Amino acid sequence: MDAALPPTVRSIFERSPPRDDRVVVNIGPSHPATHGTVQIIAELDGERVLRTDVHCGYLHRGFEKECEDHTWHNLIPYVDRLNYVSALINDFAYCDAVEQLMGVQITRRCVLLRTLLSEYSRVVDHLTCVAAALMEMGAMTAFLYLVMVRDFMYEHLAALTGARVTHSYGRIGGLARDLPQGWLERLAAILLQYEEFVARVHTLVDRNRIFIDRLRGVGTLSTADALHWGCTGPVLRSTGVPRDLRKDTPYLAYAELDFDVPVGIQGDNYDRYFVRMREMDESVYMMRQLAEMLQSSDGDGPVNVDDRRCTFPDKALVYSEIESLINHFKLVMDGPAVPAGDIYVAHEAPNGELGFYLVSDGSGTPHKVHVRSPSFVHVGAVHRMLEGGQLADVVPTFGSINMIGGECDR
Amino acid sequence: MRAHTIPIEPAGGRAKSAAFEYIATRKDELIGWARKFSIFPYPFVTACCAMEFMAVSASPYDTDRFGAALPRFSPRQADLLMVVGTITHKQAPILLKVYEQMCEPKWVMAFGVCATSGGFYQNYAALPGIDRIIPVDVYVPGCPPRPEMVIDGIMQLQDRIARSRHPIITQDF
Amino acid sequence: MDAPAIFDTLCCSAATAAAPEVSHGVLVFQPTPPELLPLVRRLKEQWGFDLLLDVTAVDWPGRQPRFEVVHHLYSTAHKCRVRLKTRVDEREPQVDSMVALFGSAAFMERECHDMYGIGFRGNDDLRPILLYEGFVGHPLRKDYPKQREQPLVPYRH
C-alpha cells in the first residue's frame, strides 16, 4: 500500500486518545452493512461501544454546485439521485418548491397522481430499508421476498416513467407524461401481491425470538434526544411522537385522505422496523383511495398546467407557430424564469423531512439549491443510539435509520 | 505500487513445442471454465446503482445462475471488484487500497456510468471514471443499468476469462 | 396557536433591528450577527421551536456583506417554520454556533464551514465532513470553479 496517500479524515480519537485497554475499530467506508459509504470509528471496551466517530461525505458528488450550472428543468435528474430509493418524492418536493416560488398552480389530476406516486415511492423505500436491515441480520428469505415485490413495483414504474430506479418524472408545472392504459389495474394487482409477501415476512420475523432479542431495547432514542438531534420521520415517530408533515402541514392531496400515523413506543430498532411496516400498509391504503379518486370524474383533466412560463408547448404548435417555437427555445436554453427570492418547501420523505431551500436571482438557472437532508441529520444523531450498545448492534441500529448516501452527502 | 494485470500474450515469446501448447491451451480452457463460473464479487457499493445490484442478485435476474452470486466482503477472498456507483475523490484511496489487496487473478467491473466515466457529475468531487486509478475489464454503463445489462456485462467478462491465459505454475504454464 | 397567530406574536416581540416578514408561509427574520444566538435561544425556549432544520449559507459575490447564513427552525407544537438570515462579511465570516442549543447543529455547521468557509464560534469541531483533509478552498463559493479537482490518488492517464 502506498504509504504516501494521506488519510482523508481525522478522527476524534487523535485529540482524545483512548486508554490502553480500549480498542479503536474502523468500520467502513467500504463495508457490506454501512449502506454504501459511511465510516464509523468506534472505541470499544471488549464488545461494548463507548464512543463513536461517524464520518460521511464519501459520496459527496457536488449536487449543489452542479445545480448552479443547470437550468431549473435540467437539474431534475440530479434531484432524483438524492434519495435514490424513493426518487419520485425528491422530484415532486423540488418541483413543488419551484412551482410555489413561481406562483404556478398544478392541476387536480397532477395533485392526485403526485400523491399516489409519493406513496408508491414511500412503499419502495421502506421495502428496501426493511429488506436490507433484515438481510444484514441474516434473514435472507425476507430480503428475497421484499426485493421481489419491489421488483414488480420497479417494472411498473418503468412502464410509467421509463426508468426503474431514478425516474426523473416530475416536471415544473406537472409531470412528464400521463398514465398509460391499464396502469391502475396493474397497480391493484401489485398491491395484492405486496400484501401477500409482506404477510409472509411478518410471520417470519415479527415474533421471532432471535429478531426480538436483537432489536428490542437496542438503539433506543428518547423523544427529547430525537428532537435535540433533529430527527424527523420514522426515527422521531418511533419514539412515540406522531409528527408527520402529511398531517401537520398537509400538502398535495393528503388533507383529503384517510390515514393514520403509526408511532412506536420506546424508540428502539424494533419500533423503527414496525413503524416502517405499518407505514407501508397505510401507504397502500392511501394508494387505493387515490386510485379510486383518479378513476372518478374528479381525477380527469390534463396532467400539466397550461402555463407558458414552465410547461413546454405542444410539439405540433412548436413546429407550426413562431411564438411556441420561441417559447420552447427559451425554456430549453435559458430555463424557466423563476422570480427572485427564496423559498423552503418540505415534504414528508420516507426518511423524514426532506426540504428544498431554493434561492433564485430571477434567471433560468438557480442561484442556490440546498437540500435539507434527513439522512444527514440522522447520521449526526446516530452516535446517540450506538454508544453504550454492543459492537454487533452497530449494524442493525445503523440500518434502522435508513441512511441513504446520495441524500446524506449530496 | 502500481496495479498491474497478467498480459494475455507473454512478452518476448519463446518457441514451444506443439504438444506443450496443446496441453497449455486445454489447461487454460479448463481453468477458464472453472474461474468464469465461480466468480466471487466484491460489491464495492456506493450509490444508486446499489438498487440495481440488489435487484440483479435477487430474482428474477439472479446472478447465482452465472455462479457470481456469493459476495465476498473481504478483498482477499474476492476476485471480481464490482465498483457500483459513483466514486468520489474522498473514496478513491479506499478503492485503490481494496483493489491492491485483492489477489491475482482479479477483474474489475465498472457498474454504472459514474464508475465508467463520472456520469453527469463532472465537478470537483467525483472521480471521472475509476479507470483513472485502477484498470477496468468490463464497463457496464447506465444510470443505473438495467439488470439485463449487468448480466450481459458478467457474461462478457466470463467470455474474457474463458479466452484468457491462466498461468498457474510458471509464467508460461 | 396556528401559524398566522404565532407569527403575529413573534413579530411583536422579535427584538431584532429589522422587522420580520412572511415569505411563502415562513416567517423570515434578518438578525445582525450579535442578535442571532439570543434570538434562537428565545425561539427555542420561549416559543417552542424545538427542531433545528437546517444551517446553510448563500454567497452573493457582488454584494456587501457577501455571505448570508440561513437557519431554519421548526416548531412541532405550532407546526410552522421560521428562517433567520444573517449577513456576514467576507473578511470575517463568523457567526455564533448553535451546538449548545441543538445537537443537530454540529454536522450542519461543519458542512456550512466546508462549503462556504463560514466560521462558527463555539463549535470546536469544524473538521471537513463532506470534503476531505487536504482539500483547499470552499467549493460552493461562486469563485471556486466547478471542475477544479483535487485528486488524492494520482491518475493513471
Image (spheres, rainbow, N blue to C red):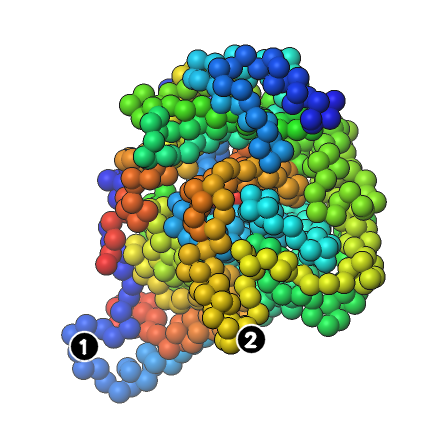
Residue C141 is at least partly visible in this image: yes
A270 shown above or below B51: above
Q: Left or right: C155 with respect to A360?
A: left
Name the foreground residue: C118 vs C99: C118
Q: Left or right: A229 with respect to B30?
A: right
Q: Which mark is residue A316?
A: 2
- x%, y% of residue A21? 46, 20
- x%, y% of residue A8? 34, 37
Q: Which part of the image, by quadrant, shows the N terminus of chain A?
A: top left
B2 shown above or below A219: below
Q: Which mark is residue B13?
A: 1
- x%, y% of residue A33? 55, 44
The residue shown at (66%, 17%) is: C9
A319 shown above or below A349: below
What chain is tagged by disc 2?
A: A
Name the foreground residue: B57 vs B65: B57
Q: Amino acid at mark 1?
A: Gly
Which quarter of the figure has residue C78? top right
Name the foreground residue: B56 vs A106: A106
